[in-house]
Amino acid sequence: MTNQSVDVCIIGCGPSGLMLSRLLAIKGVSSIILERSKRTHVEKRIRAGVLEHGAAQTIIDSGMGERLKAERMLHDGVCFVIDGKQARIDLTAYAEGQQISVYGQHEVVQDMIAFTLENDVEIVFDAADVALHDFETGVSPSAGPNAGPSASPNASPSVTYQKDGQEHTVSCKYIAGCDGFHGVSRKSMPDDKITEFHRSFPFAWLGIMAKAEPASDELIYARHRNGFALHSMRSQILSRLYLQVPLETDIADWPDDKIWDELDLRLGADAGWSVNRGEIIDKSVTPLRSFVVEPMQLGKLFLAGDAAHIVPPTGAKGMNLAIADVRVLAVGLAKMLNENDGSMLNEYSQICLRRVWKAQRFSWWMTAILHTPEGAHDTYQSRIDQADLEHLLSSDCYAKIFAENYVGLPFEV
Ligand code: RFL
Ligand code: PHB
């Protein structure tokens, strides 16, 4: 049995938890990260690939972006293939010179973990049965309406976990729930204190990573009567590709050749373009869903990233939102802990949710116009979606709105 004390106990060692820990350290606030999985698992999990301009800059400014700076692929534009016809949006021209960075989330996480450990912040991997205690009490001086009951403003939260057959306790001033959609933090909030908003989509993405030179320098989003496809990449020798598939898809029904043929069909434009094939080293199916919890804070517990909201990956927003959340949270916590000023912490939810809902709208819209529900490609809705895409690809005003959202809206904090 051990007992430790820190300012902030962070649950989850994904991009949100790691970035929060670093931003707090810069402001002299101590933290520990509790992670239920093993380090190797966390570092190998293949997920996001696109960083907004501001998210990449945040990683670089935090000191954790040396490899990102050296190895990222900076993109000026993004391509679309709509029923075989190709078009391109020049992001940099429409978004005041800003670019997106293509760099794998697992590389971001590896870089952040190495940096965190080198800088003597503790990460406990393999932490089982993480449980949150006594966080519901008042948040701070001048607590706002979402801050929970303030019956005992001096009560301190704590977090317990099991490791190596022992129970451990972390006493802290605040808890940050950065533990993803399936984590324990949001589930610890009483149902009557939160409102959850859900939307599910009637399809999933089959994603592959392949040892193949990307066949295009830029990302290609395709809408085809068979469904959506996406051509992305991780490096000059690694391609990342996705196909819209039915929700109940069994990966065994998709042998490699079938995947490649379908990618060629959906992504192939007029000119007979085809993807470069290679050894498939990862294959997975992910259902698409949207989710938001309001508020993102209760007493001294603050949720960030996927713990508080999920978007379908079509808009490439999830990891970017996670980074935007913890920028706000770090400033709010530091102001409270260093200056006894709770004004920003009490506004945490409202500030984050303004960005979250805009990203929800953008991700929902990207998903709606680019996917074709099975058997529903000649419907009223599919004609509306086609018209929407044609407008996007022929209008400077519309392209500017797209580019502003895709490279990332400005940060409030
Ligand atoms: P994470 O990354 O899920 O990390 C949460 C961590 O918490 C741990 N955990 C626990 N630890 C202790 N106790 C518990 N009880 C715990 N329960 C869970 C987990 O093991 C994990 O280590 O959440 P975070 O940090 O909020 O980061 C969010 C991002 O991971 C996510 O939004 C993105 O991956 C979404 N996403 C994309 N985002 C982008 O910004 N750009 C993209 O291009 C992009 N592409 C994608 C994506 C997500 C995808 N999938 C697989 C859903 C593409 C795909 C296919
Ligand atoms: C990726 O490279 O994994 C990726 C790119 C763009 C998206 C989603 C995922 O919209």
Image (cartoon, rainbow, N blue to C red):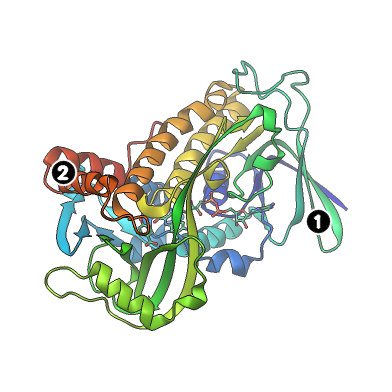
Q: Which of the two residues, 261 or 185, is positioned nearer the viewer here?
A: 261
Residue 274 percent coordinates (x, y): 22, 76
Q: Secondary structure at mark 1?
A: strand
Q: Quadrant of residue 116?
A: bottom right
Residue 45 percent coordinates (x, y): 53, 65
Q: Dot 2: few (<14), some (14–19), or many (≥20) neighbours within 10 Å?
A: some
Q: Secondary structure at mark 2?
A: helix
Is residue 257 positioned above or below 142 on the image? below
- Amino acid under disc 2: His
Is residue 343 positioned above or below 360 on the image? above
Q: Dot 1: few (<14), some (14–19), or many (≥20) neighbours within 10 Å?
A: some
Q: Along the horizontal axis of the image, is 365 left or right of 154?
A: left
Q: Which of the two residues, 370 or 307, is positioned nearer the viewer here?
A: 370
Determine if residue 3 is in view.
yes
Q: Residue at x 48, y 49 (%)?
A: 289
Residue 391 bears which disc, if any?
2
Q: Which quadrant does the C terminus fall into?
A: top left
Dot 1 corresponds to which residue?
Answer: 162
Q: Quadrant of ligand 2?
A: bottom left
**What is the distance, in whole Å, between disc 1 and disc 2 at their CAs?**
55 Å
Q: In front of the other: label 1 or label 2?
A: 2
Q: Which of the two residues, 353 or 85, is positioned nearer the viewer here?
A: 85
Residue 186 percent coordinates (x, y): 65, 40
Is residue 86 positioned above or below 254 on the image? above
